[in-house]
């Protein structure tokens, strides 16, 4: 049974930083595109950042220059370094593993990030 387990969320003040981790029990983790999504109350889930199996990255405009996605295939883990956090970054952050353009995918359970003074 595939599991994606996120960690690293919490409460942080505006301007602060957090690093999210997502550990995946995927035997072929290196072949998956890994993404971080978020969902704020009353809003749709949105893509925040994505890293392909070859290391290509994509960022939503709202987080460019502040967030960095990376992966460690030896540890089956993807990270999201979040700097200069803003209150509007408050959301539940989800990890997703994707292959074959969505035909084969898995979600994590989510981790809460709250940015507030």
Image (cartoon, rainbow, N blue to C red):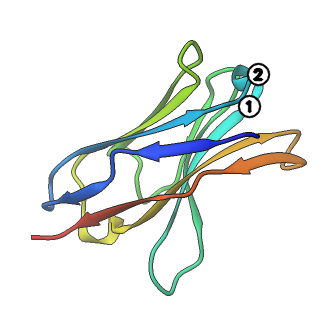
Residue positioned 90% across, 48% down in the render: 103
User: Is 115 left or right of 15, judged from the image as shown?
Assistant: right
Residue shown at 53% from the left, 18% from the top: 75
Most extreme residue toward the left, as rendered?
117
Q: Residues within 10 Å of mark 1 (few under 14, many from 20)?
A: many
Q: Position of residue 81 (x, y in %)?
A: 35, 38
Q: Are marks 2 and 1 in contact (CB under 8 Å)?
A: yes
Which residue is under mark 1? 32
Expressed as whole percent of the image width and height from the top left, the position of residue 38 reads 50, 63
| Mark 1 residue element | loop
Residue 57's spot in the image, x, y percent? 58, 34
Where does residue 68 sit, x and y in percent of width and height?
A: 41, 37
Residue 115's image quarter?
bottom left
Vertical comparison of 52 with 75: above or below: below
Q: Residue at x 32, y 71 (%)?
A: 88
Q: Is residue 44 left or right of residue 91?
A: right
Disc number for residue 97: none
Asked whether, in this view, residue 15 is left or right of residue 47, the answer is left
Label of residue 28 in the image: 2
* Position of the C terminus by quadrant: bottom left
Helix or strand or loop: what does disc 2 sit on?
Answer: loop
Nearest the viewer among 66 and 21 is: 21
Name the residue nearer the viewer: 63 or 32: 32
The reply, left or right, for residue 72 in relation to residue 98 is left
Position above or below: 101 against 26? below
- Toward which corner of the image does residue 74 lie, by quadrant? top right
């Amino acid at each position: 049974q595939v599991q994606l387990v996120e960690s690293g969320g919490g409460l942080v003040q505006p301007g602060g930083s957090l690093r999210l981790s997502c550990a995946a029990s995927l035997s072929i983790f290196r072949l998956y595109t890994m993404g971080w999504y978020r969902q704020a109350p009353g809003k749709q889930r949105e893509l925040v950042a994505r890293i392909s199996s070859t290391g290509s990255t994509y960022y939503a405009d709202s987080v460019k220059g502040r967030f960095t996605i990376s992966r460690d295939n030896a540890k089956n883990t993807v990270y999201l370094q979040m700097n200069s956090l803003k209150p509007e970054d408050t959301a539940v952050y989800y990890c997703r593993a994707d292959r074959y353009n969505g035909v084969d995918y898995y979600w994590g359970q989510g981790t809460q990030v709250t940015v507030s003074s």
